[in-house]
Image (cartoon, rainbow, N blue to C red):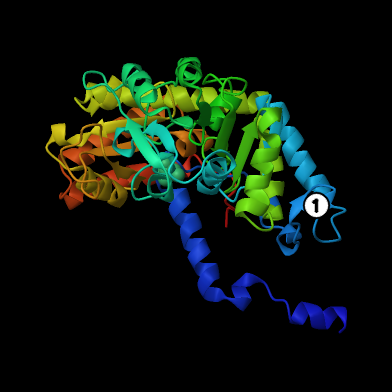
Amino acid sequence: MSKEQTILHDPHLSERDPEIFSLIKEEEKRETDKIRLIASENYASRAVLEATGSILTNKYSEGYADKRYYEGQQVIDQVENLAINRMKALFGAEHVNVQPYSGSPANLAVYLAFCDPGDPILGLSLPAGGHLTHGWKVSISGKYFNSVGYGVRKDDHRIDFDEVARLAKEHRPKLIWAGTSAYPRTLDFAKFREIADDVGALLIADIAHISGLVAGGQHPSPVGIADVVTSTTHKTLRGPRGGVIMCKEEHAKAIDRAVFPGLQGGPHNHVTAGIAVAAKEANTPEFKAYAKDVVDNAQALAESLLGHGFSLVTGGTDNHLIVADVTAKGIAGKVAAQALDRAGIVCNYNSIPFDPRKPFDPSGIRIGTSSFTSRGMKAAEAKLLGDWINEVVAAPEDDKVIEKVAREVKECCDSFPPPGIPVD
Ligand code: DSN
C-alpha cells in the first residue's frame, strides 16, 4: 500500500467518526465555559494529554522492565522506568509501581498483597468522608473482608482518633486505611502509625485526593510513615487517569506481584507515559505555587461561603475541598448541585457526617478548587464564586437568577482559558 493510500485509509477522527468528534468538541466547550468544582477532577496539561493519546496505547507489555512476557519492549521499559524514577523523586518513595489502572485497582492490589478473604480491615466510613474501597459494604472491599468503619466526631467532624484506637484494639485489623474522599482537613499520618503499631496492623495511606498537595508541599506526606501509599494520578496531581502504589522496599515484591499477575494484565503504556510527564511537571516550583493556590483558593471560597451563612463540615478547610451542609439554607444537596450546574458551576451532591438524608438525596455539596486553580483563578474569583453559589442556592428555581449567574460565570471563564483544551 502506498503512503497516499495509507493516509486515505486513516482519516482524522472528525472524518472517521463525526459523532464522537463533535461530542469531544462539546465536552471541550463545557469544560471551557463552566467552573468545574468536582473535587476529584482537574485539567491535564497539553503535554500530559499528548502522551496519553499517543501510539504507546498499541503495545502490550505484561510484566515489569527487563522481565516482560512480550518482545519489543525497547521503548516501553524506558517509559515505565522514567515514570517510576520521577515518582520516586517527587515523593521520596523507596519503591513505586505505576501500573494500576486507577485508584480502585491500586487499593484492590493492596488487599491482594496482604489480606485473605474475611480478614478484618479498618477504614474511614463512606458517610464520614471515606472511600468506597476502604471497606464500604457495597464494594468488594466490604464484601470480601470483615470491614469495620471508624468515623468523625459529632461536635467538630474531625477524625475520631479515640474511636480509631478503640476499634483497632477490638478488631485487630490486618490493615488500617488513612485516606479520604470528602474530608476537608489535614490527615495526621503519625497518629495513624502509632495506632497501627499498637495492634500490629499495616498502615495504608490513600492520598488520591491530596497527592498534588503532598507533592507541592501543602499537605504532610505519609511516605516513610505508612507501609504503603496509594493514589490516583489525575486529581490534584493533574496527570492522566491512572493509579500508583508507593511502598517500602520490604513490600515491593508483594505489591508488584499483586498488581501483575495478581490483578491486572498489560499496563496501559500511554497512561504510564502521561504519569511520567505529570511527575515531571509536578516536580517544579510552578507546581508548588499551584498547590499553594489550590489551598488558598479553597480557604478564600470557604470564607466567602461562611460570610453568606453557609454551614461547612469542620467549619472550613485545610486542603482542596469544602463540604457544605446546604439544608441549613433550606435546600437539599441534589437540588443545589443541579441548580448550580444550570448556572455553570459544576459540583456534586454529597453526604455530610451523620447525614439524616439518604446518599442519593443527601444534605450536602462537595466543592473542590483544583480545576478552578488550574485555570489561573485566584482568591478574587473564589470570593465571586461564593457570591454566585449563594445567589443560586437562594433561588434554585428562578430562571432569571440562574441565567444571570451563568452569564457572569461564562464571562469570568472567558478570561481564564483552561490548560489542555485547544482554542478553536
Ligand atoms: N469517586 C472519586 C471522588 O469523586 O472522590 C474518588 O474515587
- Relative placement, left or right, of 69 versus 19 is right
Quarter of the image where the N terminus is located:
bottom right
- Relative placement, left or right, of 308 versus 27 is left
- Quarter holding ligand 1: top left
State the residue at coordinates (40%, 47%).
34
State the residue at coordinates (37%, 26%).
184
Q: Is mark 1 within 8 Å of ligand 1?
A: no
In the displayed image of the protein, which residue is found farthest to the left? Answer: 330
For the residue marked with disc 1, what is the amino acid?
A: Ile
Image location (x, y in percent) of residue 98: 67, 43
> Label 1 neighbourhood size at 10 Å, few (<14), some (14-19), many (20+)?
many
- Relative placement, left or right, of 421 versus 55 is left
Quarter where residue 305 is shown: top left
Quarter where residue 239 is shown: top right
The residue to which callout 1 is attached is: 76
State the residue at coordinates (57%, 57%).
424
* Local SS, label 1: helix
Front-lying residue, 2 or 318: 318
Q: Relative to 296, say whether 387 is above or below.
A: below
Image location (x, y in percent) of residue 25: 51, 62
Quarter where residue 147 is shown: top left
Q: Relative to 380, say whether 252 is above or below.
A: below
Front-lying residue, 147 or 240: 147
- Residue 145 in sight from this viewpoint: yes
Image location (x, y in percent) of residue 342: 28, 52
